[in-house]
């Protein structure tokens, strides 16, 4: 695999944007009673193909209750931003087939350079930024209730995740997120 061109990253950005748009729309249509407070794309340090994930207040309560049924005492604050613990983790993942094809064409993620992986992550953030600019995640008070981000669950760089969150969200949407991430 040669060095990806700017056109390759543009194709990735567009494919991620459209897959994320459809995943978010389908999620809200399938669960109209849920109050979603997070939508994101989860990836890895090697910038594997992103997977959609979302969090809702009721979903958080169900997740905490599920752990308690197993005898594990967790507080909601401990899982509030655990996107892969959510009942909505990977909801809409089927819409990412074109994205998967593009990422597969870039070779083994463990053999790609840090620069390529950084540009792939930037394409993911740019895709969500476009959707944010279109008002896909809401406007006004509705938008203030949803945090949008690209994360690397488990081994992500907290500074990088906060930087992308600040780029993708109005400051009023980030108050709780930033406070919780600072702990």
Image: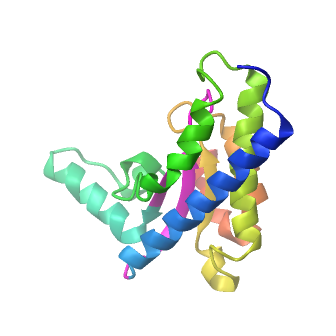
Give the total of numbered labels.
0
Q: Would you say residue 106 sits in the magenta stretch?
A: no
Looking at the rendering, the stretch of residues picked out in magenta corresponds to 33-54
State the residue in front, 157 or 119.
Answer: 119
Q: Position of residue 136 (x, y in %)?
A: 64, 74
Q: Position of residue 65 (x, y in %)?
A: 23, 59
State the residue in front, 147 or 7.
Answer: 7
Residue ID at (54%, 41%): 100
Residue ID at (77%, 20%): 2
Q: Would you say residue 45 sits in the magenta stretch?
A: yes
Which quadrant holds residue 21? Answer: bottom right
Q: Position of residue 49 (x, y in %)?
A: 56, 39
- Relative vertical location of residue 160 with respect to residue 137 in this rendering, above or below: above
Q: Is residue 173 left or right of residue 70?
A: right
Residue ID at (37%, 82%): 33
Q: Quadrant of the N terminus?
A: top right
Residue ID at (44%, 59%): 92
Q: Is residue 103 left or right of residue 74?
A: right
Q: Residue furthest top?
A: 111
Q: Position of residue 170 (x, y in %)?
A: 75, 69
Which quadrant holds residue 86? Answer: bottom left
């Amino acid at each position: 695999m040669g060095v990806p061109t700017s056109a390759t990253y543009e194709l990735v950005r567009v494919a991620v944007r459209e897959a994320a748009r459809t995943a978010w729309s389908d999620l809200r249509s399938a669960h109209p009673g849920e109050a979603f407070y997070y939508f994101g794309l989860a990836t890895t340090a090697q910038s594997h193909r992103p997977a959609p994930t979302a969090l809702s207040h009721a979903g958080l309560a169900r997740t905490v209750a599920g752990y308690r049924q197993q005898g594990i005492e967790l507080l909601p604050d401990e899982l509030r931003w655990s996107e892969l613990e959510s009942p909505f983790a990977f909801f809409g993942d089927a819409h990412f087939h074109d994205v998967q094809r593009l990422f597969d064409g870039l070779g083994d993620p463990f053999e790609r350079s840090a620069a390529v992986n950084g540009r792939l992550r930037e394409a993911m953030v740019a895709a969500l930024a476009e959707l944010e600019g279109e008002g896909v995640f809401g406007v006004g008070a509705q938008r203030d209730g949803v945090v949008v981000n690209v994360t690397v669950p488990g081994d992500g760089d907290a500074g990088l995740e906060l930087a992308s969150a600040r780029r993708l969200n109005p400051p009023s949407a980030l108050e709780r997120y930033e406070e919780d991430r600072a702990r």
